[in-house]
Image (cartoon, rainbow, N blue to C red):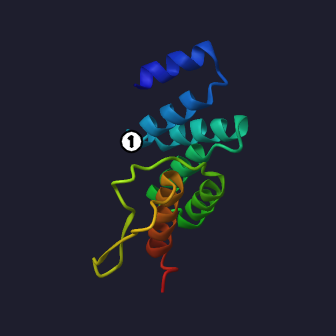
């Protein structure tokens, strides 16, 4: 996948999806400098790209830079576009005691829910959660 994203970027260096994708691959390969460069480039090209902010937040969270991660997750929440979620899969959340709550009325917007979850995790890990 890394080679494919890099190849795509040799054709079009402003291809935001390839920057985000390559950033994710580099983040997973534990190459934070390369991942950060790709996420930053994607954000500079398309400042309203929620995926780039979300993935950069995950990178910062892995580096224990929780305050910056929370900023990126919060930005991603504000930018997340609604996506359809399968109606037969209600939203679920788990509290600190492991109790599962299921939303019966309607599922949340998937990217927004994922980003909100990541903010909660980052806040908890940073010790802001109380």
> Which of 81 and 22 lies nearest the eye of the viewer?
81
Whether 105 is drawn above or below 50: the answer is below
Estimate the x, y position of residue 25 in percent, counting from the top left: 42, 35
Q: Residue furthest bottom?
A: 130
* Residue displayed at 47% across by 62% down: 118
Q: Residue furthest top?
A: 11
Whether 1 is drawn above or below 31: the answer is above
Is disc 1 placed on a helix, strand or loop? helix
In what quadrant of the picture does the N terminus appear?
A: top left
Estimate the x, y position of residue 75 in percent, counting from the top left: 65, 57
Estimate the x, y position of residue 61 in percent, counting from the top left: 48, 59
In this figure, what is the number of numbered marks? 1
To which residue does mark 1 refer?
28
Q: Is residue 101 left or right of residue 77?
A: left
Q: Is residue 30 left or right of residue 123?
A: left
> Which of 100 and 45 lies nearest the eye of the viewer?
100
> Which of 77 and 67 lies nearest the eye of the viewer?
77
Whether 56 is drawn above or below 118: the answer is above
Quadrant in the picture for residue 26: top left
* Residue displayed at 60% across by 51% down: 80
* Residue displayed at 59% across by 67% down: 67
Q: Is residue 116 left or right of residue 96?
A: right
* Residue displayed at 43% across by 26% down: 2
Q: Residue furthest left?
A: 98
> Which of 64 and 70 lies nearest the eye of the viewer?
70
Estimate the x, y position of residue 93 in percent, counting from the top left: 37, 69
Crowd band around label 1 with a 10 angstrom C-alpha radius: few (<14), some (14–19), many (20+): few
């Amino acid at each position: 996948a890394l080679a494919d994203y890099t190849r795509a970027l040799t054709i079009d260096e402003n291809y935001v999806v390839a920057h985000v994708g390559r950033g994710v691959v580099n983040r997973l390969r534990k190459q934070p400098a390369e991942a950060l460069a790709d996420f930053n480039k994607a954000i500079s090209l398309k400042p309203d790209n929620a995926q780039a902010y979300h993935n950069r937040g995950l990178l910062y969270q892995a580096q224990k830079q929780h305050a910056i991660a929370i900023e990126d997750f919060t930005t991603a929440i504000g930018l997340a576009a609604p996506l359809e979620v399968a109606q037969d899969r209600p939203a679920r959340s788990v509290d600190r005691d492991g109790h599962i709550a299921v939303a019966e009325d309607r599922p949340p917007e998937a990217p927004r829910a994922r980003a909100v979850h990541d903010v909660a995790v980052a806040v908890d890990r940073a010790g802001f959660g109380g």
